[in-house]
Image (cartoon, rainbow, N blue to C red):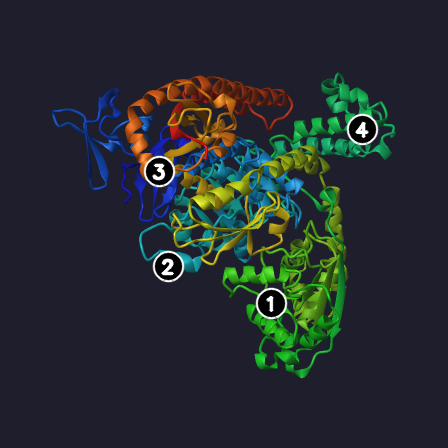
Amino acid sequence: MYKTGQRWSSRNEPDLGVGMITEKQSKSFVLHFPDAETDRQYSNDQTSLVRRTLTPGDQLSFQDETFTILEVEEIDGLVEYRISNDDDWLEESVIQFPRNDKNELDYILSLSPARRMWFDLRRHTLEHQADNAASPVRGLMGLKAELLPHQIYLAHDIANRPKARALLCDEVGMGKTLEAGLILHQRLLNGLCKRALILTPTNLQHQWLVEMLRRFHQPFSLISEAVYEDFMEGDDNPFEQQPFVIAPIDWASQHPHATQHMLEAEWDMVIVDEAHHLAWHPETPSISYQVVARLAAKTESLLLLSATPEQTGEREHFSRLQLLDADRYHNFEQYQAQQKEFKQAAELAEMLLPLTEEENSDLSIDWDNAFAPYLDQVKSKEWFANLDKSGEVRMSGAQEAISWLIDRHGTGREMFRNTRAAVGGFPNRYLHAYPLENNEHFASANHHVQPETDVQDGLWELDPRWVWLKEFLECQADKILVICHTADMAQWLNDQLTFAGFQSADFHEQMPLIHRDRAAAYFADEEGAQILVCSEIGSEGRNFQFSHHIVMYDLPEHPDLLEQRIGRLDRLGQLHDVQIHVPYLSNSVQERLFHWFHNALNAFCRTTSAGDKVEEAFRETLHAYLRGEDDDLSLLDEAKVYHEALLRQMEEGRNRLLEMSSCRPEQARALIQQINEQAIHGLHHYIEDVTHAFNIHAECINSDPDESAWFIRPSTDMMLEALPGIEEEGKMLMLNRRQASQREDVAFATWEHPLITMLMDEVQGFDSGKLTSAILPIAALPEGTVLVESMFVIEATAHPRLKLAQSLPMTPMWQLSDSNGKFLHQQFTADKWAEKLKGVPNRVAEQWVAALRSNLIEVLQAHQLNAQDQARPIVQAAKTSYQHRCQNEIERLSELKAFNDAITEDDIQRLETNMQEGLTRIDEHQIRLDAIRIILTTKPE
């Protein structure tokens, strides 16, 4: 079906223009779009492309000459055009494809008229697409989770940079995965990313897989050793076959062939989780560091994630910053000097921060001395003078002073850090320990981490923990999350609890994803399961903060896994204190693990980002202690002292200016307000109209536009082959973010949901909808009066980096006239006019078009001229808006460049070049006829 040289255009991204297939692989191909100067890779089973060919009478260009097409012929999938009577033919791959590739008017009038509703649906689709394309929060609306200010601010800042390269080092539990997902999602929807690679530790690969799918509706392919070997039966590069890939970094960097294939593939974005494990030494950098360095050198966007970026030392931390920007971070001593200056600015910000609160606004400070390094730059500023005043004036001055420091030292920085202390809103955690006397059946617990090891499952009911769990649950009325290490144990516990009369569900990796979703929804339902039993892997990436009791049926070996378990409940949005229940067998490995986590790390009652370092420092003695070979409890005391010292050191090194530059609350709130206003505005009625048009089964559960929910299911007479994200048995779409984010079995619908974007693309691709007809019952006009509606579209093609759509998206223009060319559209709104119309049988409509064709051509030519007049103020306003937006950013960065080393002359030159190119592209806009509706008047009934 697909051949090199064929011409195609994208329904998803019509502003790219017409592209040509330049590279063909077994399961995918590459399209080059010359107008947008970009390439896109598509899989063979895609449905978003439209084949583009020319017809006799159209014109084409070849070697700077224009020819009229006389004849068209297809040979082996490629179209050839005869351009002369001498039998000269040109293959489609060598011609310059015209932007107006056919006579749209003749083509539309040759169609069979569709139902009248298609005209209005096309108009509404174009209007909504224009609104979304122009939105500054496009790409941030579709997150299926609560909108947290620090996440939205950070994602918006990084995603809108020319290159999204940053180190995300939020504390544990602050949502680094969601932040990276938001950045990726934003750049995907804005055309800046088409291929992405996520490298994770092996134990986190499933969590990423679930988070990307459930939170962003973005499916990834997991390429691990087993999957890779399956692919290697052929010659294809498995990393090139899939546009979105997750791979375990330890395997991918140690397997030579996989490494080579991964490096040969082209990526627009690479994300590396737990980046502090990228060990570096001047003489012997780790293999994983070298692999990421090679990826970083050839990839536009790079995100490194680490809650503890500096725990391995300042020099290694600097080595990871070099991955992000080798030019800026080329000298370690210079970096240290910059950090010293940044620390001084942070101390000044710490001094200013209390003054932003009313109760501290009367503190007396010598500001000339405090701002001594910057005095020449700030003494003329109004906010500096206001620092010596009182009340709200001083509070405002302090806030502006902090903003000035952030602009000076924060703008353009690669490192972002949000902390629990700065963000606030997290619950307290309380530990409840239950030491249990062991028995002879579980003697192996003394030397195995999992007590049931070497114990037949027929004896598991004799486990003292099981006896305790039944008694404990009989006294509980709240929902309880029970976590254990293995899927077998999770399934056994659920079976036993159900048999004992408890309302329980299990949740583990051996279950299909859809069954896990149902189990999670059953647990979330107020009338559903009281108990959910999860395995370690099965619960990765899932949040159950509607529960506040967690039972650790066993303990993991690593503090990070312990934190992941508690993090299922301990999250922003948790309304209660988290109660942690830990039963353990006396004199067992589990008991010793408990004391290590509790007495040495205090890991149950607070998060710790230093657990790795403590375990590394006490590795040998810790292993001996856990195995029961050394009962010297002084280990716990020594580790506790060491751990507390590390935490103090980290707190002393806490950089409040970095935290403040990572989230500016006022800007974050404004972004969230925009998202809330736009994410579902008008969507309820659009779902109703578009599902009706395509014969999709859609049942409205709640008709309130802001709270609506729809049950969507494919129907037997549906006009589409498949519905993205909708199973055969159907799916609930909810338009309320909070309600949807609390249920795993429903989808959160916004204008960015794949089903909605696909349906909008299908509306545009449904050519029959370009010609419709209707009757207008009216007494004021003679019966049989012809009226004509048209819709023209302003299009400007450009590379996504120019962000042209924010000023000039694909803009529809509606017109209405009588058959004499008298325009009437200024007397009505398009929606009010549509309400007056009624349908007409297709056979009758075809007769109208045939009889009126010559007159319609004249009327629509007048519409074409009027559309050009309509477009002029729109285009001029777009140019003014685009130039103003670009110029403001150029002036802002030019001012900051004087004292912010992160901003270079190249940054400013790039903005100026982009502005000029964008203005040129706006001038080169095209006006295209999109749809026609022919109306005949009748007498009212």
Q: Position of residue 47 (x, y in %)?
A: 37, 44
Q: Inspect this view and state whether residue 787 appears.
A: yes
Q: Which residue is mark 2?
A: 230
Gap between marks 1 and 2 measured at Cα = 34 Å
Tell me where residue 746 appears, x and y as whole percent: 56, 53
- Residue marked by disc 1: 505
| Location of mark 4 (residue) | 395
Mark 3: amino acid: Ser
Secondary structure type for disc 1: strand
Kind of residue at badge 1: Ala
For the residue marked with disc 2, what is the amino acid? Asp
For mark 2, give the secondary structure. helix
Give the mark toward the camera: 1 or 2. Answer: 1
Neighbourhood count class around disc 2 (C-alpha, 10 Å): few under 14, some 14–19, many 20 upward: few
Image quarter of the C terminus: top left
Q: Nearer the viewer, mark 3 or mark 4?
A: 3
User: What label sits on residue 768 in the rendered view?
Assistant: 3
Q: What's the residue at 42%, 18% (across, down)?
A: 822
Crowding near the residue tagged with mark 4, few <14, some 14–19, many ≥20 C-alpha atoms within 10 Å: many
Tell me which residue sits at (26%, 20%) in the image: 64
Gap between marks 1 and 4 measured at Cα: 53 Å
Mark found first going from the N terminus, 2 or 4 = 2
